[in-house]
Amino acid sequence: MSSKKITPGKLILYIVLSLGAFLMVLPFIWTVLSSLKNMKQTFAVPPTILPDPVIWENYPESLSALPFGRAYFNSIYIAVIVTVIQLFTASMAGYAFAKLKFRGHNLVFILFLATMMIPSQVTMIPLFIIMKNLGLLGTHMSLILPASLFNAFGVFLMRQFIASLPDELEEAAIIEGASVPQIFFRIVLPLVKPSLAAFGIFVFLGQWNNFLYPLIFLNRTESFTVPLLLNFFKGTYATDYPLLMAGTVISILPVLVVYMFFQKQIIQGIAITGMKN
């Protein structure tokens, strides 16, 4: 029982973590509260925290002001396709680097990790030129194809997880006559589900919140994603902030639901990246 007592050091740590958590969630709380105000309440001096009265009409007006339904569909199917392909390619590459000791595999793995140090701004213009030459500008393939090729972080994550699996499992499968694809699909993949779930959530959230590349590659309203469509609430001379905040809350809800259901896998996947080979 004595080991469960909260020491002064732990109490201070809990207080600091609680304050940090509050600071992290404060912008979201402010966004939700602002979505229930009108323009007068939004710019009131001194600022008001709670909306009075509550303007629930901001949400239906936000949905009807712009084609959010189409944008939701675009964001979901792009994020799902990219996530599925990256899970497949990253897990295969991670298995190759962790268990298949081919010549130069360490060098190739280092080169993979080195790509994480290249800023996206460096590859933005060459990527735009490539998509233009392929005739993919203005289409969703310009977003799906580059993002689906490979993900260095995903390869690293899967490699760390697969490397922690005992070699005896693979040796036993080889003795039974299993081929490399059979070992990968029947033994490795079922054992790396937590890591796959964590990586899949990271990829989905990254694609859902992607704003810069859709802004560069897409040029038609019907092909816009949710983050890009939200930008339309910002006018040249004025911005309807209550509707903007309402649309932002609507766009956050799917991400919030995904995180609430899979937060255990996220934490477990992050912890596994620190495991030794």
Image (cartoon, rainbow, N blue to C red):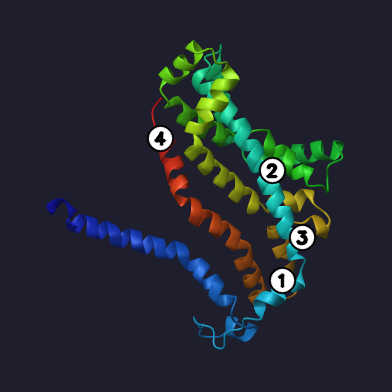
Which residue is disc 1 drawn over? 63
Residue on which disc 3 sits: 70
Q: Which residue is at the far front?
A: 176
Label 2 CA crowd tier, 10 Å (few <14, some 14–19, many 20+):
some
Q: Which is nearer the eye, 208 or 20?
A: 208
Label 2, label 3: how far apart the Cα atoms are: 17 Å
Q: Amino acid at mark 1?
A: Leu
Cα distance, mark 1 to mark 2? 25 Å
Point out the tag, 1 or 4, that comes first from the N-terminus.
1
Quarter occupied by residue 231: bottom right
Tag 2 or tag 1, which sits nearer the N-term?
1
From the image, tell me which residue sits under label 2: 81
Question: Which residue is under mark 4?
Answer: 274
Amino acid identity at mark 2:
Ile
Please report whichever mark, 3 or 4, sits nearer to the chain's N-terminal start. 3
Q: Secondary structure at mark 2?
A: helix
| Image height of 208 relative to 110, above or below | below
Residue 107 pos. (x, y %): 55, 19
Front-most of 272 and 34? 272
* Residue positioned 74% across, 44% down in the render: 143
